[in-house]
Image (spheres, coloured by chain):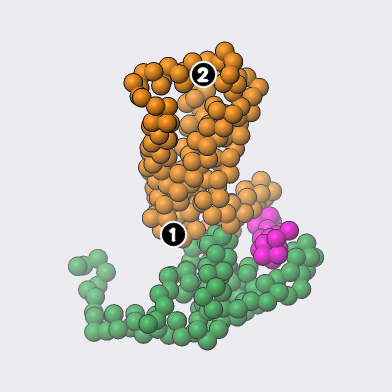
């Protein structure tokens, strides 16, 4: 284990066994422990983990089922989960510092990082995992998109796709900031004195 | 110029200078966390205090060393912290700045302004 992390885990274990477990019971004590562990992770790492998770799932899905039939409920469930995760990351950042600004920045930063990773994973999915050389629908979509763009060169079309991707990252950062603001605001509103905790 | 200290940084440094609880006097991570919660009278997450301690150590305001572990900690060592001269100077500077800010100011009774 990380030398820096070892004494911190020891501190948490000590508090868990001596104070939290006897007072709160096993389930709430476990939740307390998980919350303390989560508070040790900075927002950008959460964003990285979230982006890697959703991106890997996207690539794996494409590998196993190359011709997906997205349905509205599935897409809504995925993006609601992602939005809730951005809000939770913002909440964690706000509760660390007691500043709403950190909640907003944490949510925005995590959203930007995770969207960046998801976008990169999507690039891998479309241009590497999917077999472009065969009769794949994605190739048709890609070719159709290029034709519809009335562009002269494929590089220009790629640049436009990159700009769209960047806009997606910035848009996600805005949504993440909103989610972080909501989560952070709720956390700061219900500040609990230590006497009410144990 | 004096270095700016946030509320949590001040609470952590004060917890090391003059602990008010028995546990706080031990000066390791958990003791500082409990001491900070006692001083601020609110729940503080572990991440907030350890990040602050790391930041203060990087600024040279506190130093730390590892001590032996105990069975209740699963044998994991304790990291004991100590305030350094730079940390003390920063605390003095913050107190002087706050005193100057409030000098000569008398607020109306709360709720009547």
Q: Which shade of the palette goes to chain B? A: green
- Position of residue A138 measured from the top left corner of the image (x, y, whole percent): 52, 19
Q: In which quarter of the image is the N terminus of chain A?
A: bottom right
- Any mark on residue A98, and which? 1
- Position of residue A24 measured from the top left corner of the image (x, y, whole percent): 64, 52
- Any mark on residue A139, and which? 2
Q: Quadrant of the C terminus of chain A?
A: bottom right
Q: Which residue is drawn at 45% across and 44% down?
A: A112
Pointer 1 and pointer 2 on the same chain: yes
Q: Residue furthest top?
A: A135
Q: Is the magenta stretch mostly helix, strand or loop?
A: helix
Q: Does the magenta stretch include residue A3?
A: yes
Crowdedness near tag 1: few (<14), some (14–19) or many (≥20) residues, C-alpha within 10 Å: many
Q: Which residue lies furthest to the front in this view?
A: A152
- Position of residue B69 measured from the top left corner of the image (x, y, whole percent): 76, 70
Vertical placement of residue A143 versus B51, above or below: above
- Any mark on residue A158, and which? none
Q: Is residue B29 left or right of A158 when viewed as pictured? A: right
- Highlighted magenta segment, given as a residue range: A1-23
Q: Is residue B72 left or right of B16 when viewed as pictured? A: right
Secondary element type, mark 2:
helix
Q: In which quarter of the image is residue A60?
A: top right
- The chain to which mark 1 is attached is A
């Amino acid at each position: 284990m990380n030398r820096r992390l070892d004494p911190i885990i020891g501190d948490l274990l000590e508090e868990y066994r001596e104070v939290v477990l006897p007072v709160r019971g096993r389930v709430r004590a476990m939740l307390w422990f998980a919350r303390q562990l989560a508070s040790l992770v900075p927002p950008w790492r959460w964003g990285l983990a979230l982006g890697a998770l959703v991106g890997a799932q996207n690539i794996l899905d494409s590998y196993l089922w190359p011709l997906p039939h997205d349905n509205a409920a599935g897409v809504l469930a995925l993006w609601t989960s992602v939005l809730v995760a951005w809000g939770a990351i913002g909440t964690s950042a706000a509760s660390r510092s007691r500043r709403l600004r950190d909640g907003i920045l944490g949510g925005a930063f995590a959203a930007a990082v995770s969207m960046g990773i998801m976008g990169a994973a999507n690039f891998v999915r479309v241009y590497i995992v999917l077999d472009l050389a065969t009769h794949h629908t994605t190739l048709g979509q890609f070719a159709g998109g290029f034709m519809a763009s009335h562009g002269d060169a494929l590089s220009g079309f790629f640049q436009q796709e990159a700009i769209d991707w960047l806009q997606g990252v910035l848009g996600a950062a805005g949504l993440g900031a909103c989610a972080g603001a909501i989560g952070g605001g709720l956390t700061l509103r219900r500040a609990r004195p230590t006497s009410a905790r144990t | 110029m004096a270095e700016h200290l946030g509320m949590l940084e001040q609470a952590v440094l004060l917890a090391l200078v003059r602990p008010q609880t028995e546990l706080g006097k031990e000066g390791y991570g958990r003791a500082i966390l409990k001491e900070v919660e006692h001083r601020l009278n609110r729940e503080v997450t572990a991440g907030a205090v350890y990040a602050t301690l790391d930041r203060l150590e990087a600024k040279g305001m506190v130093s730390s060393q590892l001590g032996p572990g105990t069975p209740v900690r699963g044998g994991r060592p304790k990291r004991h912290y100590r305030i350094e001269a730079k940390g003390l100077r920063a605390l003095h500077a913050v107190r002087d700045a706050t005193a100057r800010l409030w000098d000569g100011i008398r607020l109306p009774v709360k709720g009547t302004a």
